[in-house]
Amino acid sequence: MKTVAAFISSALIATSVMASGLAPDALIKSVSNEVLEIIRADKDIQSGNTKKAADLVEKKIAPNFDFLHMTRLALGRDWRQASTEQQKALANEFQTLLVRTYSRALTEYKNQTIDVKPLVLKAGETDVKVRSEIKQPGAKSIQLDYYLQKDDACWKIYDIEVAGISLVTNYRESFANEVRNSGIDGLLKTLRTKNKSGDAVASQK
């Protein structure tokens, strides 16, 4: 499930959300179509070049996510145990972990398309859910929901649900277990170890 969610997250390649001035549903539709076109034209990514995919994610996708908010949701009540410095470090490591996951998912693209459902945005609304479906040739469509929050006129994604399962919630149990066993520093150490291991694998590509 994490891989599916990560693949869809990778569909959010675009310029600055603030600069686009698009409504949340129009934004997701526009950038989803853009990224699919990029993947179709990039033989390196299709052939499994995760380093190139990671560079693409860092430059084009990551700026559209609120990783601090995502990390806070993933930690739940344990977030309050972390100092400000630890919170920033956790968000950075979680971002690195997700970026790497998104990068691997990009290389698994197999002619999927995304149907974004229209959103009725109410005046003054700053927290929305954009619904969509992933259509796969010869397979059942997958329900996909994006959660976005508006801050300083900028829409940011803070969670994704695939078939009703939250990407953030997927990490909550493992994070809670790590904090319970080893504290916040233990969780940080685990994330850093995973990310370093991922660096070693990516360097071999």
Image: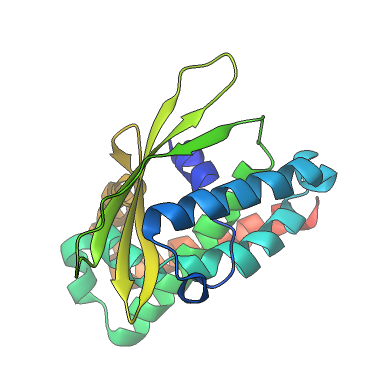
How is the rendered protein coloured?
rainbow
Residue occupying image coordinates x 74% and y 57%: 51
Q: Quadrant of the N terminus?
A: top left
Residue occupying image coordinates x 24% and y 67%: 126
Side of 122 relative to 74 (left or right): left
Which residue is situated farthest in the top direction here? 138
> Would you say residue 50 is visible in this rendering?
yes
Side of 54 relative to 12 (left or right): right
Q: State the image coordinates of residue 132 (x, y, percent, origin top left).
A: 40, 38
Q: State the image coordinates of residue 29 (x, y, percent, origin top left).
A: 49, 49
Which residue is situated farthest in the right direction here? 43
Looking at the image, residue 91 lies above or below residue 114: below
Q: State the image coordinates of residue 171 (x, y, percent, origin top left).
A: 34, 50
Side of 35 relative to 3 (left or right): right
Number of numbered discs visible in the structure rendering: 0
> Would you say residue 192 is visible in this rendering?
no
Which is nearer the eye, 135 or 178?
135
Looking at the image, residue 57 lies above or below residue 153: above
Residue occupying image coordinates x 51% and y 39%: 3
Looking at the image, residue 157 lies above or below residue 140: below
Q: State the image coordinates of residue 147 (x, y, percent, origin top left).
A: 31, 54
